[in-house]
Amino acid sequence: MTDEIDYEIDAEDLPKRMERRELGSPSVIVDDVHITYRVFGARRGGTTSSKTSLINRAINAGRPDTGPITEVHAVRGVSFVARHGESIGILGTNGSGKSTLLRAIAGVLPPSKGRVFTSAEPALLGVNAALLPKLTGERNITVGGLALGLSAKEVRERTSSVADFAELGDFLYLPMSSYSSGMGSRLRFAISTMQTPDILMIDEALATGDSSFRKKSTERIEEIRDSAGTVFFVSHSLGSVRAMCSRVLWIEKGKLVADGDVDEVCDAYHDFVAGRSNASAGASLR
Ligand SMILES: Nc1ncnc2c1ncn2[C@@H]1O[C@H](COP(=O)(O)OP(=O)(O)O)[C@@H](O)[C@H]1O
Ligand SMILES: [Mg+2]
């Protein structure tokens, strides 16, 4: 029962480890960032203090169906500096705050405390990246390309190479709702990297790719790093993280517990997850 690690990938399928290289200037600075979600109407759990619940009671007076405001402190004082040319893996069990942190770096979610500096506008490529399921792949490439700031002419010129990269075939002209999850995630990756982004953030978006696509996307990530971009890579596949990343951050319950060497952090995370699942297996036997 460890969905935290994806063991399916065969190590032989993976490309050779990315080489280390000289690092450039800082591209992202995350300085003591805290992010708190406020969930309205939640009735149990959370960290509602008696003070806020008094305020909540006042706010909610006369609105019987609304419960107190529950605060979820998703990211708790994370700091690090990312540099141009780095490819940074982010590990952490479900709910540990990885996606929240990426959203804060992308500027979608303001930190409740602390600051984020970026040298360019980051492209966030997530499981729910804004593709429109009712539109065809072709239309989504157009919409995505324009959203990335390409001109209509540039989009037209690049459409067929994006479709080839994503291996869509004739599905290019069918609505995305008819795509397999692998096709969808390949297209998301291909669209987001249509233009070489300075900062690319990949949130569990490559999980469904097969080995040949993984090789291609690793090469694309390598190109982005070559052009001095920074890549953030959230994945449950330790194999992909080991192959694609030059550094790993491990976030647990909103806190940065490790930041450093790929193998060291991956090994420690692997042991942590294995230990947890053994403990829960033991508990269920009792
Ligand atoms: N939109 C939201 N509103 C309230 N709580 C949220 C929201 N998104 C995430 N959370 C909570 O924040 C914490 C971190 O979530 P998330 O960043 O998605 O973790 P991860 O990506 O590591 O699985 C979890 O406790 C989750 O339930
Ligand atoms: Mg997530």
Image (spheres, rainbow, N blue to C red):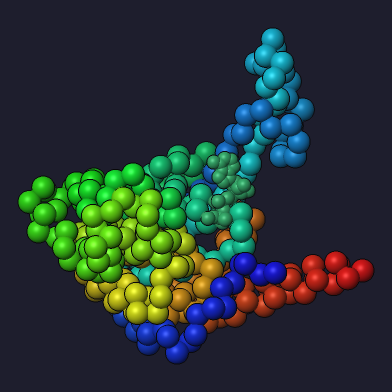
| Residue 173, above or below 214 | above
The one of 153 and 170 positioned closer to us in this rendering = 170
Quadrant containing the N terminus is: bottom right
The one of 163 and 146 positioned closer to us in this rendering = 163
From the viewer's perspective, tell me whether residue 149 is left or right of residue 251: left
| Spot occupied by residue 98 in the image (x, y as percentages of width and height) | 52, 56
Quadrant containing the C terminus is: bottom right
From the viewer's perspective, tell me whether residue 271 is left or right of residue 167: right
Residue pictured at 70% horizontal, 26% vertical: 68
Residue pictured at 44% horizontal, 55% vertical: 127
The answer to which quarter of the image holds residue 15 is bottom left
From the viewer's perspective, tell me whether residue 80 is left or right of residue 5: left
Please identify the residue farthest to the right as the structure is shown.
286
Q: Is residue 148 in view from this perspective?
A: no
| Spot occupied by residue 140 in the image (x, y as percentages of width and height) | 26, 50
Q: Is residue 281 in view from this perspective?
A: yes
Please identify the residue farthest to the top as the structure is shown.
62
| Spot occupied by residue 267 in the image (x, y as percentages of width and height) | 59, 80
From the viewer's perspective, tell me whether residue 205 is left or right of residue 253: left
| Spot occupied by residue 260 in the image (x, y as percentages of width and height) | 50, 73
| Residue 24, above or below 40 | below
The answer to which quarter of the image holds residue 48 is top right
Please identify the residue farthest to the left as the structure is shown.
153
| Residue 190, above or below 277 | above
| Residue 189, above or below 275 | above
Residue pictured at 66% horizontal, 70% vertical: 2
Residue pictured at 37% horizontal, 58% vertical: 179
